[in-house]
Structure formats: structure tokens, C-alpha cells
Image (cartoon, grey):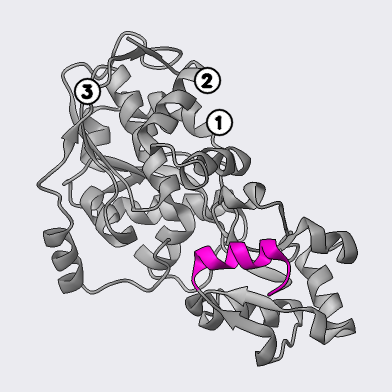
Amino acid sequence: MRTRTGLASAAALALLLTGCGLKSGSPLVDEVEPGSVGQGQPLKGASLTVTSKNFSENIILGHVMGLVFKAAGAEVLDRTNLPGSISAREAVAQGEADALYDYTGTAWITYLGHAEPIVDPQKQWKAVRDEDLDHGVTWLPPATLDNTYALAISKKNNATYKLKTLSDVAALAKKDPEAVTICVENEFASRDDGLPGMQKKYGMKLPASNIQKMDAGIIYTQVSKSDSCLLGEVYTTDGRIKAMNLDVMEDDRQFFPNYNAAPAIHTETLDKYPEIADLLAPVTKKLTTQLAQELNSKVDVDGQDPHEVAKDWLVKEGFIREG
């Protein structure tokens, strides 16, 4: 889903940008008008390009941003659904696109190359904002939406174990080592900010036989079925958490990095159209982890179109009106 690796080389970035389709895109043709945002159409005459990474949540957020700009009077080119984090990020940094919703943890660790996350989400955002100005990207204030790692258990199994936190999981692993079986992705199984680091932080010592590696989508199914692994690696905003009746363990020792969504804007664009900040502020404020689960579920579980999910939510909240 998200790229959480170290910085790519300059050559690799150039190749990504060459192949990511930045010369193509589709204009947003929706007939939308200002609601509670965009009154007076402060972006009338502007031509803006929005982008996103290639997973459902970020595509939805890209369309949220594009529709807000459109209602505020801009001509908007949709270049969402780019492959991976680096290509979308570099599009904004280099001015090939004007804006996307990005994630503070991804910026701090992947783009800016820091090994240690900052525990406080607001301090994490401020550190990203301050450092990324040097790269031509301005970060607007973040949402509480936090798309980070977690472990989840089926409600059926949790009726027996009554686990609420990762400390509870660690205590169970110590008391009954055979009970704690975990399904994870290959990368999570080996990363310091994944399973090895989590075990170290919480004092767990799971035998290798208790850890199964598989694709992300299969993990949700296996945990939900309650017969393959007790717990599984999930993303906290995934719509399948609610759809498959899973309980998410609280990271009570704050091990996993914060991945708060925030608008990342090409600085020259924001200088030219400072109204963008006021347009996006109330929208971003409404974005929560629970809301992301609901919107993601509409796409990943119900099969709805991300653009329509974004527009329906904006209209429901009164941010925009259909023309």
C-alpha cells in the first residue's frame, strides 16, 4: 500500500517521473459549486493539477482535494493513482502537480530519510513542514486521520482473550506462547518499524513458527476466519476492519510512527494561490481515522468509485454543492 522504504536515488526518481504518466490526466468535469467552502470562487482562473498514490484512501483524498478546487472556480486536472509514494511526492516537489494529501510519517522516514519517528503527531508534522520547505513543498495542518500499522483480532476470538492493547498481547504471549500466532506481510516481518521492533518494544519473543507471512489482503481474511492466525497486521484506516468485525489493538507504548494525512502543496502554487490553505482547512479537520475506514470500505468492500465516494462525502458535509 504505502512506500515505507529509504529515499530512492536521484536517478530512480527521474525514472519514476518519466514513467508515471505525468504528461497525461483527465480534467474534472463535475458541475459543482461552493458550499461552505469556496464562496466567491477564489480560485477562478486557476489551473491546478491534483495527484495521489495508488491505493484507495489516497485516491479518495485526491478527489476530495480536486473537487474542492473545482467548486472554488479552478480548472482541475486529475492525475491521481500514480504508482507508489515517491512518484506522487516528486510530482508535487518538482511542480508537475500542485497538490496531494500525503502522510507525515512517510515524509519523515521515506522522503526526508530519518530513522526515528517523532512520537507527538503535531511535532512530527511541524518537523516535516519545516524541513520540507527546502524541497519546494509546503505542508498544511494535518488531519487526525492516522493510517499507521496495527495488529487486529477477530471479535469472535477476542470474546475469549479480551485483548485491548499490544501490552495485553505481550502478556498473553508470555503466559501462553502457543496462543499468539500472527499473520504479517513480508516487509513488516523484517523491518525495524515492523514486527521485530514491535516485539523488542513490548518485550515479546514469538517463535518463528507462530509467524506466517502472506499478502496484505489475505491477512484480513485469515484473521476474520479466526482459524489461521490469532492476530494480523492491518492499516488503521482500512475499511475491512469494520466490514470483517475486527478489533484493533491500541499501541499503548506508541511504537508505530504517526502517518497523519495532510495537504502537501507545491510551494510556488501556494504562494500564487494562498486561498488554498483556507479552502482545505475545514475539510482536513473533518478527516478522522474512523471516517477513512468508512470511506475506504465503500471502495474496497462495496466496490464504489473513489471519485463518487469523495463527491458524495463533500456534498453530504455541505462543503460543496452539485450544480
Q: Secondary structure at mark 3?
A: loop
Q: Counting residues from the N terminus, which is met first, the one under dot 2 or under dot 3?
A: 3
The quarter in which the C terminus is drawn is top left
Question: Viewed as shown, does residue 16 lie left or right of 160?
Answer: left
The label nearer to you, 2 versus 1, is 2
Question: Viewed as shown, does residue 256 lie left or right of 108?
Answer: right
Is residue 81 depicted above or below 161 in this figure? Answer: above
- Residue 234, position in %: x, y? 59, 62
Q: Residue at x 51, y 43 (%)?
A: 296
- Residue 245, position in %: x, y? 71, 51
| Residue pointed to by mark 2 | 317
The amino acid type of the residue labelled 3 equals Val
Is residue 286 depicted above or below 229 in this figure? Answer: above
The quarter in which the N terminus is drawn is bottom left
Q: Is residue 246 visible?
A: yes
| Residue pointed to by mark 1 | 286
Quadrant of the rendered image containing residue 119: bottom right
Disc 3 crowd rating (10 Å Cα; few below 14, some 14-19, many 20+) is: few
| Residue pointed to by mark 3 | 29
Please tell me whether residue 206 belongs to the stretch shown in magenta.
no
The amino acid type of the residue labelled 1 equals Lys
Q: Secondary structure at mark 1?
A: loop
Q: Are the two marked residues, 2 and 1, in contact with CB atoms closer than 8 angstroms?
A: yes
Is residue 316 depicted above or below 189 in this figure? Answer: above
Q: Secondary structure at mark 2?
A: helix
- Residue 167, position in %: x, y? 80, 70
Q: CA distance from mark 2 to mark 1?
A: 9 Å
Disc 2 crowd rating (10 Å Cα; few below 14, some 14-19, many 20+) is: some
